[in-house]
Image (cartoon, coloured by chain):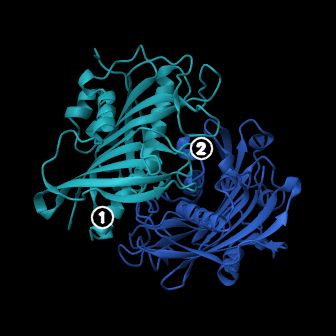
Chain colours: A blue, B cyan
């Protein structure tokens, strides 16, 4: 357990076109900030890290948990304060927590950022992201399959506080693997989408990062794309899709895939009423390799939509 | 005509996952750097600009001309120096030139950046981008069609050098509009793709920026996607697509479209031999609104590919 106050750093940003929109650009930035914070805190530059064999090793995203304000609500010129803390989470992995507060708000002025704020006591005007990352290397040149654990020499987290055991990201990852959901608890409500399935072929013009792996942020668009396909199949209008507000976006990454892979996305959801005629929906999306059936990623979103 | 030496600014960057890859992230950054340079040079913050009626006005991309080193060759940790100059180009528009040089190279050390370097004398290890932008506002709330010219009060370029008249971006835009190509000259060679056509529906999970317009950088992926569809239809392997090297990427934007628009992309090309068994190809892509037939964008790429 963490004792004392967690060390935090903060930076201010002005949102530009390459940082916001109905796309995955903002989560991409969150990922960059995670790599930067871990590099500063743990003794190894994530951009150029190499494993004990001298081969490149990557600080891959295992769990990406965004809660609170919807990044789709950001627009050009918005000023944000990003406060970040890094936590120990095993010898070959690390956890990073970000609080994104409007500049000038009480959240932006608060230098503390403890795990309890993320799990139990979020500020309503802030966006939070918890990342759990693990070092992986390719096991075969040019292949994105069978990535292996490979911490770079010099990587250390022993000096960092730990996350509370009951909130370990390993538990969420184990739940995703075993039960194919990242919901906190079974959700009551009417069934929405019931196992709607759509295919998605990894797009070599959009989805590959600078080292040829499928970019973690691309999965956010792939999940949103599967939700949109389900949305349209249910006869819901595109305008309601664009106007939806998403309170939670969780993604657990179970394996990477090659550029020619076809994924099968399965979309399920539960609906409950919400004040003002709006609908609350909890959506599970499971991405599988269509050929092998292997689960590639598990996602969960909590959203509100309707005639707003 | 420009007299004396053009004023330039430079910044250094380390490439992170959100800045590179087989995607449009790097051109997105180039666009941000254009907005930033124009804001600094011309007296108006492009992120928050408003027209004389108090409505938002956007520094929209009309022409985006990337030449030299292929941004797809960038990877994590690469250090680059970005030198930028801004040029006058009419009362409601502006031109911006970037030279992206490897940090520590002769190009990075050179404080000058004249138009002639871009048009006639490029450094072989540098990437260049010329942007031509014009202020536009929505003519109807919520619609991306019928954008109108609308310069913000206070915007001034009178103090800036001009581009040489023969290289005015207006000429390239006029050529694109009239002749549906951005080639410098008719290209000799064997026919490659001959009017291959594929549809693309604007993707509300990928293509919209923070103000609901189709993001200029998304067109780069849309064009690459049309090229990939043509590529596959010709039986060329995906691996050769991913290994291709692109020397020129030009895009002329003729209109924005709404989020539910289906585009029709027409792909044509000319092939010539290249040393080492490689193939040089010049590709034209014309994007039209499938319903109205109106031309939305015209693109040209020069690339080299083969058994490398």
**Residue placed most toward the observer, B298 or A186:** B298
**Residue A61: where, in percent of width, then height?**
57, 66
Question: Percent position (x, y) of residue A156?
Answer: 58, 65
Left or right: where does residue A201 sit relative to residue A86?
left
Q: Quadrant of the C terminus of chain B?
A: bottom left
Q: Which residue does the numbered mark 1 point to in the structure image?
A: B231
- Please report, as a chain letter, where disc 2 is located: B
Which residue sits at x=37%, y=33%?
B83
For the N terminus of chain B, the image quarter is top left
Upstream in the sequence, badge 1 or badge 2? 2
* A185 over A98 or under it: above or below: below
Image mark 1: chain: B
Say which of A70 and A195 sits in front. Answer: A195
Image: B134 above or below A109:
above
Closer to us: A33 or A157: A33
Query: What crowding class fits label 1: few (fewer than 14 Cα within 10 Å), some (14-19), or many (20 or more)?
Result: some
Give the alpha-carbon distance from disc 1 to disc 2, as whole Å: 31 Å
């Amino acid at each position: 357990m963490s004792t004392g106050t967690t060390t935090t750093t903060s930076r201010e940003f002005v949102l530009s076109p390459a940082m916001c929109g109905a796309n995955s650009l903002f989560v991409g930035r969150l990922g960059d900030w995670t790599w930067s914070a871990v590099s500063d805190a743990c003794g190894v530059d994530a951009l150029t890290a190499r494993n004990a064999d001298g081969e490149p090793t990557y600080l891959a995203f295992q769990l990406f948990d965004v809660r609170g304000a919807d990044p789709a609500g950001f627009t050009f010129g918005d000023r944000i304060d990003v406060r970040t803390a890094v936590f120990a989470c095993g010898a070959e992995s690390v956890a990073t927590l970000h609080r994104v507060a409007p500049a000038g708000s009480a959240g932006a002025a608060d230098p503390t950022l403890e795990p309890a704020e993320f799990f139990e006591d979020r500020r309503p005007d802030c966006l939070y992201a918890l990342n759990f990352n693990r070092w992986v290397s390719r096991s075969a040149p040019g292949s994105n399959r069978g990535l292996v654990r490979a911490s770079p020499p010099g990587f250390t987290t022993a000096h960092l506080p730990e996350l509370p055991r009951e909130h370990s990201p390993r538990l969420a990852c184990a739940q995703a693997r075993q039960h194919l959901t990242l919901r906190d608890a079974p959700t009551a409500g009417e069934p929405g989408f019931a196992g709607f399935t759509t295919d998605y072929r990894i797009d070599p013009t959009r989805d590959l990062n600078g080292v040829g792996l499928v970019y973690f942020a691309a999965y956010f668009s792939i999940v949103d794309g599967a939700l949109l396909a389900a949305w349209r199949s249910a006869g819901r209008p595109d305008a309601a899709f664009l106007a939806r507000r998403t309170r939670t976006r969780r993604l657990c990454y179970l394996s990477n895939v090659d550029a020619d892979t076809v994924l099968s996305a399965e979309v399920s959801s539960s609906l409950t009423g919400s004040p003002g005629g709006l609908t609350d929906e909890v959506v599970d999306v499971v991405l599988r390799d269509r050929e092998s059936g292997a689960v590639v990623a598990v996602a969960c979103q909590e959203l509100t939509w309707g005639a707003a």
